[in-house]
Each structure stands twice: as structure tokens, then as C-alpha cells.
Image: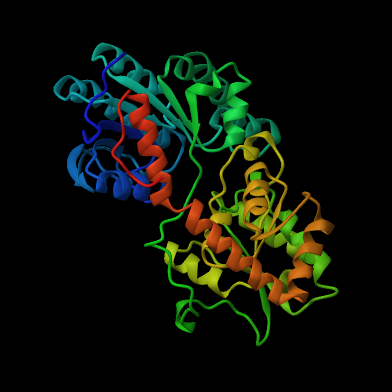
Amino acid sequence: MKAVSKPDKKLKFLFLTADKYPPFRADVKILFGRELAGRGHLIDWILQSENACRKAYHATWEGGRVWVGPADKGAGPLRRLKKRICDIIGDLKLFQLMAAEKYDFIQVKDKFISALFGLWGARIYKSKFIFWLSYPFPEANIYKAVSGAARYPLLYFIRGHFIKYLLYNIILPKSDHIFVQSVQMQKDIAAQGIPNDKMTAVPMGISLEETVRQSHPSSSAYDLQLNAGEKMILYVGTLTRVRKLDFLVRVLAEIVPSYGNLKLCFAGCGEDPADERMLRDEALRIGVREHVIFSGFLSSLEVQHYILRADICVSPFYPTFVLNSTSPTKIIEYMALGRAVVANDHPEQRIVLSESGGGICVPYDEKAFAGAILELLHEPDKAVEMGAMGREYVLKNRNYKIIADMLEKEYYRIMGRRSPSRSF
């Protein structure tokens, strides 16, 4: 039998991710920066600068060392190409670091060319290689190209097929382990011939420390243009047209004739100004423009205040292969703040609402969605009860402390070592 190391030996790994420096997404900032680093694990990072930067530099972040690569923030295809090339060149730093340090493993998240470097480095320096896929990027690129949602369809089409080949023929087959965003994504990848036991699904969660207390936000925190007594339906997230959020505008048109004292708020912005313009035009076309609010970009704290002010929160996911495998953050954020949710029959949303009782799950249908919203508008006590059940579920199952426990245990299993004793 193979001997195992002492259970209290901390992990040491190198992490390359498509997230920029400094990371702000909770699945990186909280799960790795706060939770895992806070437990004494040493994480070194290679990240590209979020801001324009001509030269690489060193930094420290959450106890780990960061090698920050240069970035060109100019507009236009050539400037964006330059930024990508700078990112790839910056990631070559991994060979120098792996030669100097004894890492337990190298982990690459959502980077495909750099994953090839990581695989090569792991083999040279006898380390394990872990790939983390948070979104079906190849399929998304191809879908945008063929659906007309891409600004440069041919470029998206070529890029989609190129990274699809790299992902399913080289990166995933040669990885020692793969982390994916949802159970559905795991099923989709398994259908490509990747063994199920080589994958672990890690869903999105929330940080209890960064979630405001359930209280009435101060009126100065936002200006929602609401009239006295008006109810608010809230959508939080990107307005990119691939999500087809004109669906919600038409849902609103189904509701207004029987419950007109309300507004639908889109809390977020699109990747392109045309995304929001399309929604405004649709609302004007069907006669509900005065019932729609667009917030623009919001900070995470502002988003939480909007959620606290909402009467009902909604999470529609257009039923495509690309979106079916996602792990929606918004539904968890809604529930963490005690708000009832109306969502469509998306794989993970169905599971979460079924297990929690935190809302109503309906088919992706305008009348069905409108009916569920009207049910909660007419039965506010039911909405409050669902909100309380949803919050309890998130606290027990989807806070990042619990997710970090699971992830830490899985890393030790991959390394063939016993994890420190914790309450799982």
C-alpha cells in the first residue's frame, strides 16, 4: 500500500487564470484568496493586469506571490490581439517558477494556449496538472458566430473550433484532474469521452462575510425611480444579447394588464451598448417602457441593496447547450438575501429550487413565468416564506466555507494525501 503524507502538510500550487489582477470574482477572490490561502495553503499566481500596464511586475495578494503581466487596454481588434499576446507571453513565466519551486500541482483556469504550457511544465518538473473550466467557451464562441450575436462572426467561429479541438483532444485527456462548474457540465464533457471519475463539479457560492445583513437599505444607497407602493421585479446580471433578455420584457407585458403597479429592473450592463438598446427598443415596441428601469453598472454592494429592495427576483436562462451547463450565481445571491426567486427549468436552477423551496421553477415560457410572478405578487407571505427557506439553504450548502472544505478535501485526494481534520 502506498504511504500517505502527514495530514497537516499544506498545499503549494501555481495558479494561472483568465481572471485579471487584482481578482474580483468571488470564485477566485473568496474561494482561493480568502478561504484556501487563509488555511495556510501557499498559492502563487500568474495574472494579467486589469489596468493598462507596459511592464510585468511582482505583487503579493492574500499571502501569495503574484507575477502580473502587461496589458494593452486600447480599443480595436489589433489592440485586443496585442493584449492576448501579452497574456500568453506572460504565462511563459510558469517554466521559470516551476524550475525554482516544488509545486504540488499547477492549475490553469479558462486558458487554453497556456494550458498547453502548463501540461508541458507539469511533465518536465514532475508535477500534477489540473484544469478548471467555468464555462463552455468553445461552444459559446461557435454559438455566437452562427446565431449572429458575435461582432466578428468568422473570428469567433474559427476560435471556437480551435479551442474546442485543444480542450477535448489535448487539455482534458492529459489533465490529472478537471474541475467543472456544474453537474450538467460534467455530463456534457463526459459525453465527449472524458471519464466521469476524472472530474469534480464545484458550483458557485457566496461569501457570508461579504453579504450585507438582511435589513432595509438606506434610501441614499440607490435611486430606483419607484413610485409609492410600487413592487419591483429584479434581474441581476449581464445584459448581453446571447441571454435573450427581451424574454423578460415580454413577461412584463403579460403581467402589467392585471398588476400594473410595478417595475422591472435590469441591474447590470451589456458587453456592448447595443445590448441594452435592444431591450429598451423592445420595451418601447410593446408599450411597457415606463415599467422598465436600467441601472447600469453596479458595485457588488449596490447589487445587494437592489436585491434587498426587490419584491421578487428572476433568473431566466435561455435553454441552449451553452447556458444549460452554467452554475448561476444570481440565484444564490438572491436566496442569500432572503428573496423569493422565479426561474426557468435550467438544470442547476431546478436542483437548487427543488432542494431549497426558495422559489418557483417553471418552463421557459412567457405566460408560465408571468403566472409564477403574479402568484408571488398576490401572495406576499408565500414569497417571504420562500425567501427564508432559500436563505437557510444557501447558508448550509452554498457558502464558500463549505465549498472550500470540499475543494480542499478533493485536492488532497488528487495528491494521494489525507486532508486535515475538518467538519464536512
Q: In which quadrant of the rendered image does the N terminus lie?
A: top left
Front residue of this view, candidates 138 and 186: 186
Residue 122, by quadrant, is: top left
Kindly tell me whether residue 233 is visible in this rendering: no
Residue 409 image point, x, y percent: 37, 36
Residue under the image location 48 percent in, 58 percent down: 395
Q: Is 85 left, or right, of 169 in this rendering?
A: left
Residue 111, by quadrant, is: top left
Q: Is residue 354 above or below residue 195?
A: below
Residue 152 image point, x, y percent: 58, 33
Q: Is 200 left, or right, of 325 in this rendering?
A: left
Front residue of this view, candidates 119 and 79: 119
Q: In which quadrant of the rendered image does the C terminus lie?
A: top left
**Residue found at the far left of this picture:** 100
Q: How is the image coloured?
A: rainbow
Front residue of this view, candidates 238 and 159: 238
Q: Is 419 left, or right, of 371 in this rendering?
A: left
Front residue of this view, candidates 48 and 369: 369
Q: Is residue 24 above or below residue 15?
A: below
Kindly tell me whether residue 257 is visible in this rendering: yes
Q: Is residue 232 above or below residue 9?
A: below
Residue 145, by quadrant, is: top right
Residue under the image location 62 percent in, 50 percent down: 352
**Residue found at the far front of this picture:** 1
Residue 335 image point, x, y percent: 56, 61
